[in-house]
Image (cartoon, rainbow, N blue to C red):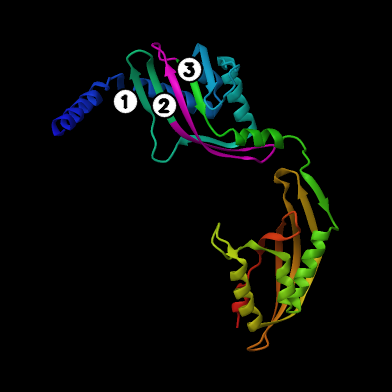
Amino acid sequence: MKKTALCIIFLCSISGTAQKKKNGTIYREHPAIQVVDAMFTAFVAGDTDKVASYLAEDLKTFNGTSSNKDAKPGTKEDFLEQMNWMNENFDYFSMEPSKGAYPDALEYDESGTWVQTWDHVKGVHNKTGVKLDMPMHRLIVVNDENKIKTIINYFDLRIPMEIWVSDNDLKNGTLYKNHENINRIRRMMHAFEFGDFETAYTYFDEKARFGSLELPDGETMSLEEIKARNTQLWATYDFTSIDEVGYPDYLEYDLGDAKVVQSWWKFRMTRKSDNKEFVIPALYIHDFNDEGKIIRSNAYISTKMLDSK
């Protein structure tokens, strides 16, 4: 049994070794890398003639993330048009190697020289204001004449799509001045004003999450944590009034089916220890579920002034 096991291990090791087959050489410095770097430097500068000088006449470009089987490759003319469009439609346009990255040149035994790059592209679309800030990976084939004949791009399609949809007016739901969810917010806020916590908390789903400017980014609190915090707050201050400022808006979004009330308030408070009075402005954004319960609350309020003597 032991001999059999040793034979199996030995055969597996031979099999693993036999599977290796060299298929070329990887270079960190290479003339093909210089061609690619020079072409994209000219691309960012918007130098059409210089870019064209690095491209093969039969250049083909591909979107490496597309699953469209009928998609046709882009041509040299398409690539130059894209360059002109980028330079005409983006302010602050730049393209630099991603942090810690550098291009490689791969001389394959059969398919020629490929250059692979990892870049970070930035810019601001000058009509829509959509920010371009994303990584881009490319596989590029350089022919024997040091001309670029193939470019395969890998990038996040969501940003170009956002630019496309933002280029025209597009409705995303309905804005209400009066709505039952607005009424719920008013009743909830005034229940807090009069110290009726039992009623106030009935407007929240038991799994509601609470965020604020004073919490670390991405961190939220639970309903139980909010109850404990409010108990301490009301023990320290008298809330003489919670006043609505302007009027709340209720938004029913088509995207994501979100139901949101945004409202503005002034908290008029008196510190019990020394009778010092405070007036604190606040903006709240409350998300509702289909049952009319608040599932998220974001408070845009600063309590720093409460530390004043």
SS state under label 3 = strand
Q: Which residues are magenta?
A: 118-147
Q: Amino acid at mark 1?
A: Tyr
Q: Position of residue 272 (x, y in %)?
A: 66, 87
Q: Position of residue 200 (x, y in %)?
A: 73, 71
Residue at coordinates 34% horizontally, 23% vertically from top-left?
A: 30
Label 1 sits on residue: 27
Upstream in sequence: badge 3 or badge 1: 1
Label 2 sits on residue: 116
Splitting the image into 4 quarters, where does residue 240 fall?
A: bottom right
Q: Which quarter shows the C terminus?
A: bottom right
SS state under label 1 = strand
Q: Which quarter shows the N terminus?
A: top left
Q: Amino acid at mark 3?
A: Thr
Alpha carbon separation for disc pair 3 and 2: 12 Å
Assess disc 2: are there few (<14), some (14-19) or many (≥20) residues with their C-alpha within 10 Å of its C-alpha. some
Splitting the image into 4 quarters, where does residue 285 fall?
A: bottom right
Q: Nearer the viewer, residue 33 or 231?
A: 231
Q: Which mark is residue 305?
A: none
Seen in the picture, residue 42 relative to 147 is either above or below; the reply is below
Assess disc 3: are there few (<14), some (14-19) or many (≥20) residues with their C-alpha within 10 Å of its C-alpha. many
Would residue 271 be found to the left or right of residue 55 on screen?
right
Q: Nearer the viewer, residue 149 or 152?
A: 152
SS state under label 2 = strand
